[in-house]
């Protein structure tokens, strides 16, 4: 291996090829801007003679198939992200640069062994359409990088009118000298005194091997190449085939690469992904899930032994590589092994995709896996079980199995948890002791309601549910607990309750007397409520709190009068207040926002939270589940005249609907 420092100018006119198996161009705006800022700061600080800005290594291997007399082509093994970004930067500045080719950019039907096919041209990249970018993710990121570069220069020009010249000088000094022979064939450096940009150049000699050998040797276990990238290299390498077959196999590799990109893109859909994987995913690429699935299938079916645990970073690659070795030892051609592996990857993805595209299977799969929330290895085993059952049963039988045997077992409550004096029944599930069971039942209910609501073909938002903490909301408000409520919060509760009382309500003498009795101590002025309270307001607030605490029992009785009044209008008692018929599923932050208002007050708050969520594309607010909306929109008694209360009829119909869904899954 040759190692030396090389100037960016030394690369001018060189020919670089990015093989299929390499990482695609994936630099985000931050990485592009960081490089530009670093180069600018280096130049602005007027470097001394011989000082240079050193980029990370550029690892290359000569490509014998693409090279010919007068043109040496190097496969880029590492460093293609910076090399591509510099190509785009030099294109923007209209500077002489190197030639860059992406094998993934070779068009359909074009000969991949022809150097010109797949070559990048800055002006051509500027003309790319949305359709072009959709078909090749590399193009999307390149266009994004080009926009970043242009925006960066426009911003810098405000304070540095000669910014373009400054950047040209740091990339290629005016005094740069061309050597008599290519730098990689000479030990001389006529530009050693230049203050410019340099790479650490590593050149590997394949010695009968292939560039992928260098790729694996340099990256495996040393730089953060993932098992997925190594598997991709195994499947897409072409220089292992006979020379007369390489053109054909590069076409095959191109097709596979396109299909790989399509799978990766589809798995970025958060609805599809949250159906498949409900917990935090530690790996960098979502297609890892498909590859990990296939690796475990291979290990079991072909009795593969590898010296690594399933939790190891490179485990999947080791299994794939070992399988290829074993099959080739049996005399199976490399091409046939790759074809078999690729078919397994495609078949696995096809099953996952079919679940997503079938609304019933999407909801049942997502519900089951969300209820389980297992670690990665157990989760993969569960997916394997699901796939095996899916392939062995017809659709109706599979759905019935998934509902009754899998989901039903997870939401069924344990009758042994009831006390000796309690009747073990569905309607007697209550808040506190049975909260975990109720959360699972209400999740299943909300998913089921969404699944069966086919009018707008809505999908339950598993991603939102998985990213938040589920919480049980008392539909008709529960009573305040004196020990847990501070004085200001109690004052706010009183203010909200007064706002919910109608003139007809206040015709009740006991209620009116309670409100009047509390007004003098719990009613706060605007100044007392404000964050910037004056000294006088703080003193007044303190006096009211002391008066309340001195007569807390008497005031507590008056508060109970208000609670009792609303309970009577809703027809609810203390037991039913905490039963499943008075509980709805929300996330914990929404629960806090809803407070202790009546049904119509909470409905208005939910609408604001939901609208904010929609307007911000999920960045703010919260998603309100369809079953929860049915509750707060009083859809269980659609002709109700008083929308303030969660009445006995509401609760009865809601409970029956919950019980019907529960029985559908558990009996």
Image (cartoon, rainbow, N blue to C red):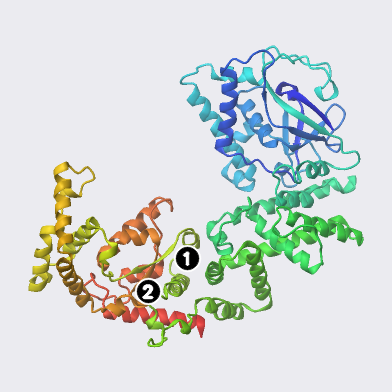
Give me the residue at 82% from left, 67% from top.
Answer: 303
The x and y percentages for residue 459 are 48, 65
Residue 166: horizontal and vertical position, in percent?
A: 58, 17
- Which residue is painted at 69% across and 44% down in the image? 224
Does 532 sit above or below residue 1?
Answer: below
Q: Is 664 positioned to the left or the right of 222 in the image?
A: left
Which residue in the protein does label 1 denote?
Answer: 460
**Which secondary structure lies at badge 2?**
loop
Q: Is residue 314 visible?
A: yes
Q: Where residue 431 is drawn, which disc sits there?
A: 2
Write the residue at 20% across / 77% down.
568
Query: Under tag 1, what secondary structure?
Result: loop
Residue 426 placement (x, y as % from top left): 41, 83
Residue at position x 71%, y 55% in the image = 312
Q: Report x, y in % for residue 275.
A: 55, 64
Q: In the visual, does 16 lie left or right of 382?
A: right
Which one is in front in this view, the residue at disc 2 or the one at disc 1? Answer: 2
Q: In the displayed orientation, state which residue is furthest to the front.
A: 550
């Amino acid at each position: 291996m040759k190692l030396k420092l090389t100037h960016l100018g030394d690369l001018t006119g060189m020919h670089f090829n990015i093989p299929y198996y390499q990482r695609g161009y994936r630099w985000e705006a931050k990485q592009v801007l960081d490089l530009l800022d670093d180069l600018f700061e280096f130049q602005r600080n007027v470097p001394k003679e011989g000082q240079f800005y050193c980029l990370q290594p550029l690892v290359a291997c000569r490509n014998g198939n693409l090279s010919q007399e007068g043109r040496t082509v190097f496969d880029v093994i590492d460093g293609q992200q910076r090399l591509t970004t510099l190509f785009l930067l030099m294109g923007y500045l209209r500077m002489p640069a190197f030639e860059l080719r992406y094998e993934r950019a070779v068009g359909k039907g074009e000969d991949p062994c022809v150097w010109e096919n797949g070559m990048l041209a800055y002006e051509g990249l500027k003309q790319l359409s949305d359709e072009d970018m959709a078909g090749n993710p590399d193009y999307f990121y390149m266009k994004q990088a080009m926009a970043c570069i242009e925006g960066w220069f426009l911003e810098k020009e405000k304070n540095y009118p000669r910014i373009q010249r400054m950047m040209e000088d740091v990339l290629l000094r005016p005094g740069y000298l061309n050597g008599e022979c290519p730098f990689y064939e000479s030990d001389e450096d006529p530009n050693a005194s230049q203050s410019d940009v340099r790479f650490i150049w590593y050149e590997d000699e394949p010695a009968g091997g292939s560039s992928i050998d260098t790729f694996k040797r340099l990256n495996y276990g040393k730089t953060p190449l993932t098992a997925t990238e190594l598997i991709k290299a195994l499947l897409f390498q072409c220089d292992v085939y006979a020379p007369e077959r390489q053109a054909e196999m590069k076409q095959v590799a191109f097709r596979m690469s396109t299909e790989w990109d399509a799978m990766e893109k589809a798995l970025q859909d958060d609805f599809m992904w949250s159906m498949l994987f409900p917990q935090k995913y530690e790996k960098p690429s979502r297609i890892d899930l498909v590859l990990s699935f296939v690796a475990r299938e291979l290990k079991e079916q072909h009795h593969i032994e590898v010296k690594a645990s399933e939790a190891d970073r490179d485990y999947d690659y080791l299994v794939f590589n070992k399988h290829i070795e074993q099959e080739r030892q049996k005399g199976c051609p490399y091409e046939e092994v790759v074809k078999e592996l690729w078919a397994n990857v495609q078949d696995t993805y096809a099953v996952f995709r079919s679940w997503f595209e079938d609304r019933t299977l999407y909801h049942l799969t997502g519900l089951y896996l969300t209820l389980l929330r297992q670690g990665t290895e157990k989760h993969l085993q569960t997916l394997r079980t699901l796939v095996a059952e899916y392939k062995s049963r017809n659709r109706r039988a599979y759905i019935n199995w998934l509902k009754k045997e899998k989901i039903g077992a997870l939401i069924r409550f344990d009758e042994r948890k009831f006390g000796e004096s309690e009747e073990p029944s569905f309607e007697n599930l209550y808040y506190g002791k049975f909260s975990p069971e109720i959360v699972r039942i209400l999740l299943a209910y909300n998913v089921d309601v969404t699944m069966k609501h086919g009018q707008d073909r809505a999908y339950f938002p598993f991603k939102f549910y998985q990213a938040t903490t589920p919480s049980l909301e008392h539909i008709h408000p529960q009573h305040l607990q004196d020990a847990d409520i501070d004085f200001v919060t109690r004052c706010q509760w009183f203010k909200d309750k007064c706002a919910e009382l109608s003139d007809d309500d206040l015709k009740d003498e006991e209620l009116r007397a309670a409100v009047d009795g509390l007004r003098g101590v719990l009613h706060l002025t605007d100044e007392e409520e404000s964050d910037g309270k004056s000294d006088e307001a703080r003193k007044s607030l303190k006096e009211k709190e002391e008066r309340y605490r001195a007569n807390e029992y008497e005031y507590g009785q008056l508060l109970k009068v208000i609670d009792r009044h609303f309970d009577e209008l809703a027809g609810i008692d203390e037991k039913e207040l905490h039963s499943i018929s008075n509980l709805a599923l929300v996330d914990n932050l929404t629960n806090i926002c809803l407070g202790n208002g009546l049904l119509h007050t909470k409905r208005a708050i939910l609408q604001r939270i939901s609208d904010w969520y929609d307007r911000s594309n999920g960045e703010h607010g919260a998603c309100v589940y369809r079953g929860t909306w049915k509750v707060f929109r009083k859809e269980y008694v659609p002709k109700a005249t008083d929308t303030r209360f969660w009445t006995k009829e509401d609760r009865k119909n809601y409970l029956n609907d919950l019980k019907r869904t529960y029985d559908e899954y558990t009996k």
